[in-house]
Amino acid sequence: MIAPYIRLYALGAIVFLVLLVVLSIVLAGANPVSLVWDVLQRALFTRAGLIEALLRTIPLTITGLGIALAFRARVFNIGMDGQLIAGGVAAVALAPLLPAGPVGLLLFLVAGLLGGAFWGGIAGEIKARFGGNEIITTIMLNYVAAQILSWLVRGPMQEAMGIIPRSGPIDASLRLPVLFQGTRIHAGILIAAVAVIGVTVLMKRTRFGFKLSVVGASEHAAQYAGIRPGAIASAALALSGALAGLAGAVEIAGPYGRLQEGFAADFGIGAIAVALLARLNPLFVPVSAFGFSLLYSGLGSVARKGMVPFPLLNIVEAAIILIFLAASVVAARSKGVEADG
């Protein structure tokens, strides 16, 4: 008897969110139906829109995997942006010392991975040793990383001319090759695919992945089984940060070619939406990432043309997450009611 009321409540929440989005579009001075068509047309049926979506899918997939890994243990890493910046900074800082060629490129990516792992590991150690709330520490570390980046590109790592706040370009041999001539789609898409496979194996086929699930399900059960939740949380934050750092190095070695402010582009927040929509399943993360990238590409295109304001992107993204969460709650509670009955 309870399930129908739960469904009705969730349906009401979904309808409210849809109406909220429609109202936001109307207040922005656009026609909702025309806007949806324009977004779909620009994202799916234009070459530039599709390429932009594919490029954005690469870092969103890698960071989404990091979120899925951490959230599986109920470790809420909100610091992917800072960890991504740390990875990019570490990679560019070590770039002058790296050999030219494939080995140098591999070391460049490893440097990014280690930089992100270090930044995530700071929050992990604070949580493991002092019981610090990882949400607060990871958010604060985002601001620290952003300020360090701003200082570096205006100070010790600024380009030789000293005019624009950015670093000098990395060596051409450290750039990821373009896979399709005439496009900007680079080999980072292959790195993202390897990351999907690696995280899937880690989470589903290893003892560590099992420990992540046990800690996420119940810390008391984990302790009873001899698992240390603090150590697992610390490791999860470091690994999650490593993936964010890898994404940062991929962005530098791919489309940017140098360190500059704004290269992170809020991938960390987007990664949370991606991972939640994928239900923390690493195999579904790239699909979710591509869907959000299409939305960003289409809405971003119409926003740049002045048809709607850019904040509408955030409103639509937030509404999608809340709609998904409402649907998830009703599905879970309906199953619970059926099981009790």
Image (cartoon, grey):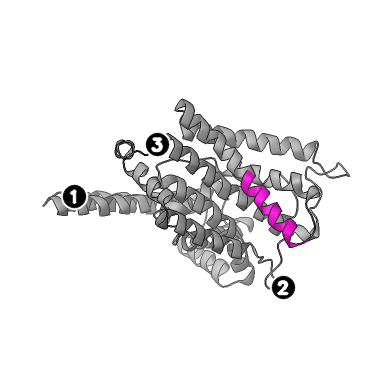
Q: Earlier in the sequence, mark 2 or mark 1?
A: 1
Up/down of 81 relative to 280, above or below: above
Is label 1 in a helix, a strand or a loop?
A: helix
Residue 26 appears anywhere in the view: no
What residue range appears in magenta?
101-114
Could you say which is closer to the camera, residue 202 or residue 180? 202
Using the numbered discs, state the Cα–Cα distance from disc 3 to disc 1 in whole angstroms.
40 Å
Determine which of the numbered discs, if any, sits on residue 228 in the image.
Answer: 3
Could you say which is closer to the camera, residue 283 or residue 5? 283
Using the numbered discs, state the Cα–Cα distance from disc 2 to disc 1 in whole angstroms.
54 Å
Residue position marked by numbered label 2 in the rendering: 182
Residue positioned most to the right: 161
> Which amino acid, mark 1?
Tyr
Residue positioned most to the front: 226
Could you say which is closer to the camera, residue 281 or residue 2? 281
SS majority, magenta: helix
In the rendered image, residue 254 lying in the magenta stretch gets the answer: no
> Which amino acid, mark 2?
Gly
Is label 2 in a helix, a strand or a loop?
A: loop
Residue position marked by numbered label 1 in the rendering: 5
Q: Earlier in the sequence, mark 3 or mark 2?
A: 2
Q: Residue at x 71, y 56 (%)?
A: 253
